[in-house]
Image (cartoon, helix red, strand yellow):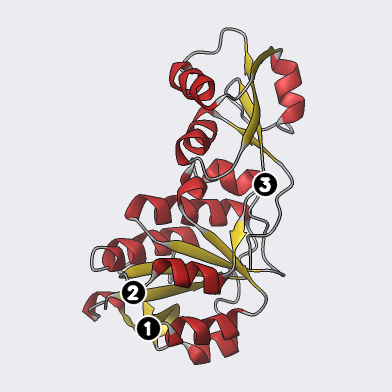
Amino acid sequence: MPPQPPSSDILYGRRSVLEALKAKGRSIHKIWIAENTHGTEEIIKMAHEQGVPIDRAQRRDLDFKAGGGHHQGIVAQASATVYLELEDFLKQLGTAGAVIVALDEIQDPHNIGAVLRSAAFFGAAGAIVPRWRSAPVGETAARVSSGGIEHVPLMRVRNLADAVLTLQQAGFEVIGADLSGEDFKSYTPGKRTALIFGNEGDGIRRLVKERCDKLLKISGAGKVDSLNVSASAAIFFQHFCKNA
């Protein structure tokens, strides 16, 4: 099946707009830059090379376009985030080694953006989000990801538990991050791994957890028993991506 048809997104902030231009994964329709905004030379150069129109605008107009977000004097209108079908992604991946992340009903778009930033930094091959009961991968997530969202292919699935079976059939070992698991440092990753992180309150849902091949945790030495999901994801990525 082809990617789902896009509408449009508003991107704001220098890093988000620059990474969208670099990735060329979606169309940038127009860029607005406020007068006396510094540090936009590379953005302007790439926009001209790609034929993206640039308009000057008042900062109050950019405040409105960005919904009050911290836009740093630059806003862009882009085609919406494109989601691949999981089966199409796996076909494109072939037999290559890879680390994929799946987010099980994470509610905070800031956490989604932070996980995608780490995924892009450590070289994760893709990210899976449920179609329902999950925070949108929209403007907030894009901003928090600092452009990382442009470099990590996204897949949206109807049923994450079924997606686990699809991944296993494709040779992925599915690892759930869970406090009941073994310490992750004692585990040697294989060539293909799918890492699943649950939502901020309840963790991974029961059926998804039961279908995981292994449950692993990060052991701490302090008085707090767990990390924020985005911090946990970064630590897991560092351990698993170097072996993919």
Mark 2 residue crowding within 10 angstroms, few (<14) / some (14–19) / many (20+): few
Q: Is residue 124 above or below residue 192?
A: above
Q: Quadrant of residue 232?
A: bottom left
Residue positioned 70% across, 14% down in the render: 57
Q: Is residue 193 visible?
A: yes
Contact check, label 3 and label 2, Cβ < 8 Å: no
Instruction: Report, in whole angstroms, how far the alpha carbon at label 1 lies from the one at label 2.
Output: 9 Å
Residue positioned 37% across, 80% down in the render: 216
Q: Which residue, given by chain and number where applicable, does mark 3 sit on? A: 80
Contact check, label 1 and label 2, Cβ < 8 Å: yes
Contact check, label 1 and label 3, Cβ < 8 Å: no
Q: Is residue 26 above or below residue 233?
A: above
Q: Which residue, given by chain and number where applicable, does mark 2 sit on? A: 95
Say whether residue 225 is left or right of residue 182. right
Say whether residue 76 is left or right of residue 243. right
**Image coordinates for residue 176, horizontal then vertical, percent:** 44, 79
The disc at residue 202 is none
Name the amino acid, label 2.
Answer: Thr
Q: Which residue, given by chain and number where applicable, does mark 1 sit on? A: 171
Instruction: Report, in whole angstroms, how far the alpha carbon at label 1 lies from the one at label 3.
Output: 31 Å
The residue most toward the top is 36
**Image coordinates for residue 134, horizontal then vertical, percent:** 67, 65
